[in-house]
Amino acid sequence: MQNKQKHYSIAIDGPAGAGKSTIAKLVAKELRFIYVDTGAMYRAMGLLILKEGIDIGEEEAVGDFCEKAEVSLKYQEGRQQIYLNGENVTDSIRTEEAGKMASAVAKFKAVRAKMVDIQKKIADSNHIIMDGRDIGTVVLPFADLKIYLTAEVGVRAERRFKELTEKGIYCNIEEIEKDIIARDYQDMNREVSPLRQAEDAVLLDCSHLSIEEVAGSIIKLFREKLN
Ligand code: DC
């Protein structure tokens, strides 16, 4: 019998706006891994529910729509593209509204089961760095390295404010901070797979560190684990 090839995995979890995706992209580039942004998948589900005008309180209807939807990830020059029912929604999921809706649909068991299944399949056949809220605890419990990345809420709000302003999107920093707090509360207090630090995850607080410093630490930790 042929030995199955070992695929390496790094799991990054943490609250909204901690810089997970920016850092994960850098690490992926350096290690030549695929970066999987699982938040994008929940955002696509959130967008679907918004577009269809489904009442978010109707768990069964939300679950049905999400189960029937086709979500797939493709990679273009190393960049993740997300497709929802054949349409590329990579850019349209980036609004604050889609983020809030993503957090709301992510509470539902049926939605999570579908997303986790897709995520596990990707990890089965690629070297990956995956970020989200339940990666170290549920999706990749045997990841080679688990990181819990966080930063002070004020710092996270400021970073998100800067990012949106640079894109020409009008926003208010107090509103952003309020939204971040509400979203974290919802993600940390849901019944199914709440956001929490896995027991074997390394805690990194990046409030006063640069992106490069954090990415460098993760790469170092990963290489140490392999030796
Ligand atoms: O990472 P993000 O901000 O794009 O994620 C959007 C929302 O999706 C987040 O508030 C909670 C949900 N999410 C989740 O529940 N589990 C994941 N693995 C990733 C995201």
Image (cartoon, rainbow, N blue to C red):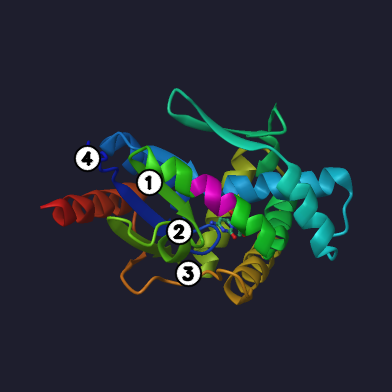
Tag 4–tag 3 contact (CB < 8 Å): no
Give the residue type at disc 3: Glu
Which of the two marks, 4 or 3, is nearer to us in this view? Answer: 4
| Mark 1 to mark 2 CA distance (whole Å) | 10 Å
- Tell me if residue 172 can be seen: no
Tag 2–tag 4 contact (CB < 8 Å): no
| Mark 4 to mark 3 CA distance (whole Å) | 45 Å
| Residue that label 2 marks | 135
Which of the two marks, 4 or 1, is nearer to us in this view? Answer: 4
**Residue sitting at x 27%, y 53%:** 218
Residue 3 disc label: 4
| Mark 4 to mark 1 CA distance (whole Å) | 23 Å
Is ligand 1 closer than 8 angstroms to the Cβ of mark 2? yes
Horizontally, residue 207 falls left or right of residue 51, namely left
Question: What is the crowding at mark 1: few (fewer than 14 residues within 10 Å), some, or many (at least 20)?
Answer: many
**Residue sitting at x 31%, y 54%:** 214
Q: Residue 129, how many percent across, how many down?
A: 38, 46
Residue 129 disc label: 1
Give the residue type at disc 4: Asn
Magenta region's main secondary structure? helix
Give the quadrant of residue 141: bottom left
Which of the two marks, 2 or 3, is nearer to us in this view? Answer: 2
| Residue that label 3 marks | 152
Q: Is residue 204 above or below residue 29?
A: below
